[in-house]
Image (tube, coloured by chain):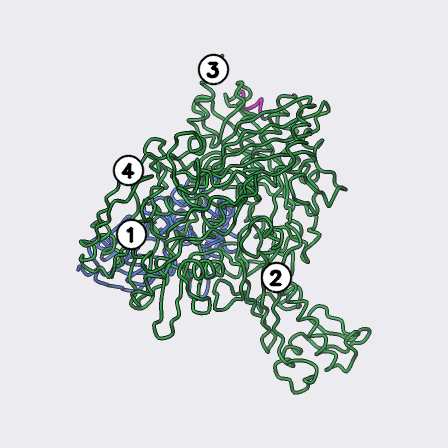
Amino acid sequence: MPNVTMTVNGKTMSGNVEPRTLLVEFLRETLGLTGTHVGCDTSQCGCCVVHVNGDGIKSCTILAVQCDGAEVKTIEGVANGDTLHPMQEAFREHHGLQCGYCTPGMVMSALDLVKHNKNPSEQQIREWLEGNLCRCTGYHNIVKAIKAGAEAMAKARP
Amino acid sequence: MTARMIGDPVRRKEDLRFLTGKGHYTDDINRPGQVYAVFVRSPHAHAEIKSIATKRAAGAPGVVAVYTGADLIKAGLGTLPCGWGVKNKDGSPMAEPPHPVLASGKVRHVGDPVAVVVADSKAAAEEAAELIEVTYNALPSVTAVDAAVKAGAPQLHAEAKNNISYDWHIGDKTATDAAFARAAHVTTLDIVNNRLVPNAMEPRAYIGDYDRATGEHTLFTTSQNPHAIRLLMGAFVLHVPEHKLRVVAPDVGGGFGSKIFHYAEEAAVTWAATQLGRPVKWTAERSESFMSDAHGRDHVTHAELALDKDGKFISLRVSTLADLGAYLSTFAPAVPTYLYATLLAGTYTTPAIYAEVKGVFTNTVPVDAYRGAGRPEASYLVERLVDKAASELKVDPAELRRKNFIPKDAYPYQTPVALAYDSGDYFSTLDLALKAADYSGFNKRRDDAKKRGKLRGIGLATYIEACGVAPSAVAGALGARAGLYEVAEVRVNPTGSITVFTGTHSHGQGHETTFAQVVAERLGIPVDQVQVAHGDTAQTPFGMGTYGSRSLPVGGSALVKALDKIEAKGKKIAAHLLEAAEADIEFQNGKFTVAGTDKSKSFGEIALAAYIPHNYPLETLEPGLDETAYYDPKNFTFPSGAHIAEVEIDPDTGTVELVNMTAADDFGRIVNPMIVEGQVHGGLAQGIGQALFEECRYDSESGQLVTGSFMDYRMPRAGDLPSFAVETHATLCTHNPLGVKGCGEAGAIGAPGAVMNAVLNALSQLGVSNLDMPASPERVWRAINDRRAAA
C-alpha cells in the first residue's frame, strides 16, 4: 500500500492507504478527523468540503494519493485554539446551523468564497453555495451568517 | 453572568462542537474489532427469490459472515413490527402482512434487502456482496396507487386483497351528502400529493455491539427515538429484554420523520454482532437512502367542497388513495388517516366533512411520516380547494377564507372530524401575512412583471396542524400501539447545577439550549449551569422521542412538572433551614424567601443542604433533590398560520422563480425565537421543495426508482430560494404549562399550498386552472402549451 504524507491543519500526517482511498476516507478513517462528513456518493452535497493547497474541494472527489505532499485544512483546523474563526462565530451568532451535518462543508465553502470575493452579496453567496446542500435551515441563516462572517473577516484584516 | 430566560434568542449550546468538527455522529464512532456490513438489495420491483448462492462471497477475502433471510428465520427472529393498527369501515382490522428483516420468498421493491455480508473492511464487504448470486423470477410490478387498486393489478401480499391494507373513513357521510344536495356551488378537485424522499443530510448508520461476558447488546443508531427502537427491536424482532439492550442515538444529522422508524438494517447489525461477538457497522450510501429510507406523502385524491349562496363552506367530501409502499413502516397506517383526515376542517367552520381513505400497497419503498406527516397533505388539499372556489366565484381568496374562519371567540372548537381546537386566531396571522407580503400592492407588481414578459402570481394558504402527539388514551383508542407521553428527569447536583435527562431527542432542533432556558427561567440560574442529555437509553428514562412537533409541548411539559416537584421539595428544605412554615416560603429568581421578610436561601444553598443533610428534616424528608416527571398531554396542540408566496413565471421556459415567501405563524409561547425562526425557514424550504422541485418517480413499466440520487432528485438549493419573511402572533395553548404549540412542521405544511396557489394565480392569466406538484419548468411549460394548443 502506498504511503501518503500531507500537512493537515498544520501538522505533518502520514499513513498507508490503498490506492483507491479517497481523501475523505483518509481524513476520517486513517487520521480520525471525523469533522469532515459524507452526505452523498455523487459529489452533490458538499458535506465533505476541505481546503487542499488553499482551494475548496470536495474530499470525496479526490484520492488521498493525489494529495501526497499537499497542505490540507479541515474544519478541525479553522478555529484558533479555543477562539472560533470569525466565520464560525458568525454561523453561531446567526443560527446558521441546526443538525450540524452540512456545517463543516458550509464553513469551508464559505471561507473559500471569501478568498475569491471579500464582500459577497446575498445573491453571490446563494450562487456560490450551489454545491452545498442543507436540509435543515432553508439556507436563510447560512446566507446571513456568511455575509456577516465575510464582513467580520474584512474588519479583522489589518 | 445573568440568567437568560424564556423568550430570549439564546445562542445554541450545541453549536461549538458542530462548528469545530467535534460532533459525534454514528458514523464517527468506531469500536475495537469492528467489522462492516453491506446489504445486497433487490434490483427488481417485484420478484420471487428462487435461490441465493452465498458460497463464493463467504469465501472471499476478509469476509466474516454472510446471512440471508433463511438464516434469520432459522434463528427465530421476528419481523419488523408496525406500531399503529387502523380499522376498516366495517370495524375489521387492517391487513398487516409481515415485513421481514431480510426478504424471504419474494422481494417487493427495488432496494428490498435480501442478504448481508460482513467483512473486515467496507471495501471487502462491498466486493463480496457482488459475488452473491440471487436468482429471481421477475413478476409484474405496480408502483402507483391508482393502478394498484385496479382489477388485475399485480398482488403484493396474500394478506392484502386488491393491495388494500385498509379502507377507512371518518365523518358523517349522511350529513355531508345532504349538505351537497342543497349547495349553491360545488368546487371539485382531483389532486396528487407527490411522493418525497426525506433526505436528511446524514445518511442512516448503525453499529451493533455485543458483550459476551455480560450478555449486553448495544446499538448506536441514527434514530429520533432510541427508546422506541429498543422496545420494537428488542421485544418484536430480536427477543432481547430491555435490560440487556442499550440503544444510543448520539448526534443525529437531521431526521424529518425518516429516522423515527425501526429499520431492517438496525436489527440485522445488532443480531450479526451477537453472532460474531464483534461490533458490526453499517452506513448507508446516499443511493441506499433513496431506496430504503421511508418516503413521504404520495396521495391521489378526489375532493369536493360545497358552498352556500353566501360563500360559506357547508360540506367537504374527500376520497383518497394513499400509497403505503411495499410494507407497513412503523407508523405508516396513522399518517394518511388520523394525521390527515382529522385535519380536513383546516381553519374553517365547515360543519360536515366525510373522508374515506384506502391505504394501498405498491412495489415502492415504504411510505411513512415525513415532516408534517398527513397534515401537509390535508392543508394542501383544503387550500387548493378554497382557492379554486374563490377563483370560480370570482371573490378574493383572502376574503373567502376570512368569511369561513373559525371565529376568535369560538374556542374550544369541536370540528366534525374528531379534533377539538383549544385556541387560535387565524384572522390575526392572516392580516400579519397580508401586510408583510404587501398583498394590496400586488396588482402593480403583476403589471410591472407583465411588461417584462413575466407572469407574476400571489398565493396564500392558511393552515392548522395537530401537534404535540399525543394524548395516550386517545391515540390508543385510534390504534396506536404505544403511549405518547413524555418524561424528564431533572438531576440537581450538590452545588446547584442541573442535568436534565429528556426522553425527547434533538437532531437539529436545539433542545440542549431550549430546555436549558426553561430550567434557567424557573430556577433562576444561568443557562450554562444546565446540561441537557438525551439519546441514550442507559441514561434517560423511557420516553418516546421527537417527531410531530412534540418535544417542547410534551417533553417541555414533563420538564416543568419535574421542576414543580423540585420547587415543592425545596420549599420544605428552606422552611426547615429558615425556621419558618412551609406555606410562608416563596420561590422567585432563584431564592427561597420567607414571605414579607429578607430571610432567604439561594437555590444553590438548598441543593447543598439536600445532599449534605447535616441540618435537614431527615425524619420527614428524604435527602436529595432529583425529580422525574411524566406528562401525558390532555389534547393535541394546534399551531396555525398563514403563508403567502409570490412567484414569477417565464412563459417561454416554464421556469418558476419564487420571489417572496412570507409566513405568519401562531406557535403559542416562544421560548427561543431564533430557534423557532430557524425551524420555520427549514420547514418552508421543504414545503417549497415539494411544490417546485422534489418528486420521487418510479418507472411504471419496470418499477425502477428513477430518482435515485441527488443527480436526479431535485433538492432545493440556496440559489432556488429567497430570504423568508417570518412573523409570529401568539395565542397560548390552554392545556400545557408552557402554553407552547410546536413549530417544527409548520413551514412544510403551509408552504406547498401557498406556492401552488401562487403558481396557479400566475398561470390563470393564460387560462391554466390546474397543475400538480412539483411545478417544474417542464410541467409548467407543458401546461402553458397545452392550454395554448387548446385555445
Answer with the quarter of the image where residue B564 lies: bottom right
What stretch of residues is rendered in magenta? B446-450
Are the two marked residues, 1 and 2, in contact with CB atoms closer than 8 angstroms?
Answer: no
Identify the amino acid type marked 1: Ala
Q: Nearer the viewer, mark 2 or mark 3?
A: 3
Host chain of mark 3: B
Host chain of mark 2: B
Q: Which residue is mark 4?
A: B138
Q: Is residue B548 above or below residue B358?
A: below
Q: Residue sitting at 37 percent across and 58 percent down?
A: B77
Are the two marked residues, 2 and 3, in contact with CB atoms closer than 8 angstroms?
Answer: no
Q: Is residue A111 visible?
A: yes
Seen from the viewer's position, the closer of residues B228 and B562 is: B228
- What distance separates the C-alpha of mark 1 from that of mark 3? 53 Å
**Mark 1 or 2 closer to N-term?**
1
Q: Tag 3, which secondary structure?
A: helix
Q: Nearer the viewer, mark 4 or mark 3?
A: 4
Identify the amino acid type marked 2: Gln
**Mark 4 or 2 closer to N-term?**
4
Position of residue B142 measured from the top left corner of the image (x, y, whole percent): 38, 34
- What distance separates the C-alpha of mark 4 from that of mark 3? 43 Å
Residue B449 falls inside the magenta stretch? yes
Q: Is residue B198 above or below residue B528?
A: above
Identify the amino acid type marked 3: Arg
Q: Nearer the viewer, mark 4 or mark 2?
A: 4
**Mark 1 or 3 closer to N-term?**
1
Q: Which residue is mark 3?
A: B788
Residue A53 falls inside the magenta stretch? no
Drawing shade for chain A: blue
Q: Which residue is mark 1?
A: B115
